[in-house]
């Protein structure tokens, strides 16, 4: 979704890390509107639960595979915010200094499905984690492909609706450790 207009901080990451590389895991489950168990339900965004999704057990720890699982969970939290306007779970899974995360949360608190600011197929779906690596700083960096459907965005109740066509974007991300789990450090959409 174009609400993701965040700044990346990948400069601390390096492909030279001996731990860099793609973990040997199954492809992530599409997360258009993940359930709290980390599985994709058959319902659309407007039918999503009023409870935020729980972090799946596969996203616990500081491995590359846990980082990849966290990315699917983060998208589920983002979709929850798109639908409800409740951004606190998204911010709880974000580093306090993540400027893009905060900017997106501020926007979604005002423009979301619950208040009519978004309608249609606005959920983001994880197509693939294109690259994931551990940098020299210990952070995780990489990119993922994310797809959204056709939807309508209205920046305020009196604003004219803007039709958004289905599209796929590449997002660059950096994760940092918080305790024994990853959080979003920065993220940027490359429309």
Image (tube, rainbow, N blue to C red):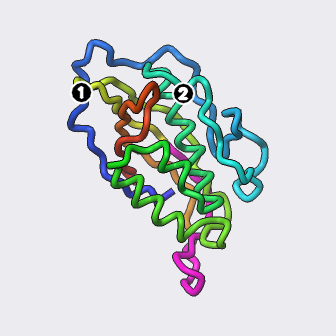
The x and y percentages for residue 165 are: 56, 62
Report which residue position mark 1 lands on: 137
Residue at (39%, 29%) from the top-left corner?
131
Residue 35, picture quadrant: top right
Report which residue position mark 2 lands on: 59
Q: Which residues are magenta?
A: 146-163
Residue closer to the observer: 22 or 54: 54
The secondary element bearing badge 2 is classed as: helix
Discs 1, 2 touching: Cβ within 8 Å = no
Image side of residue 140 versus residue 126, left or right: left
Q: Quadrant of the C terminus?
A: bottom left
Image side of residue 4 versus residue 30, left or right: left
Image side of residue 76 versus residue 99, left or right: right
Query: Is residue 150 found inside the magenta-colored segment of the image?
Result: yes
* Residue 63: mark in rendering: none
Q: Is residue 44 above or below residue 183?
A: below
Residue at (65%, 72%) from the top-left corner?
115
Residue closer to the observer: 30 or 187: 187
Q: Residues within 10 Å of mark 2 (few under 14, many from 20)?
A: many
Q: Residues within 10 Å of mark 1 (few under 14, many from 20)?
A: few
The secondary element bearing badge 1 is classed as: loop
**Dot placed on the residue nearer the N-terminal end, 1 or 2:** 2
Q: Is residue 32 above or below residue 115?
A: above
Residue closer to the observer: 89 or 14: 89
The x and y percentages for residue 166 are: 57, 56
Q: Is residue 29 above or below residue 26?
A: below
Query: Is residue 39 found inside the magenta-colored segment of the image?
Result: no
Q: Is residue 9 above or below residue 21?
A: below
The x and y percentages for residue 160 are: 56, 83
User: Alpha-carbon distance for marks 1 and 2?
Assistant: 20 Å
The x and y percentages for residue 185 are: 36, 41
């Amino acid at each position: 979704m174009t609400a993701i207009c965040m700044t990346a901080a990948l400069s601390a990451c390096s492909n030279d890390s001996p731990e860099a590389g793609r973990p040997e895991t199954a492809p992530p489950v599409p997360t258009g509107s993940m359930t709290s168990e980390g599985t994709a339900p058959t319902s659309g965004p407007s039918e999503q639960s009023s409870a935020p999704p729980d972090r799946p057990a596969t996203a616990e720890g500081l491995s590359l595979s846990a980082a990849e699982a966290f990315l699917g969970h983060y998208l589920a939290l983002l979709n929850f915010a798109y639908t409800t306007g409740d951004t606190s779970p998204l911010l709880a899974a974000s580093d306090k200094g993540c400027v893009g995360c905060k900017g997106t949360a501020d926007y979604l608190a005002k423009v979301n499905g619950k208040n009519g600011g978004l309608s249609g197929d606005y959920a983001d779906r994880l197509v693939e984690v294109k690259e994931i690596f551990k940098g020299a700083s210990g952070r995780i960096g990489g990119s993922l492909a994310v797809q959204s459907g056709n939807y309508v965005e209205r920046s305020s109740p009196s604003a004219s609706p803007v039709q958004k066509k289905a599209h796929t974007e590449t997002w660059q991300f950096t994760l940092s450790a918080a305790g024994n789990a990853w959080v979003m450090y920065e993220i940027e959409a490359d429309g």
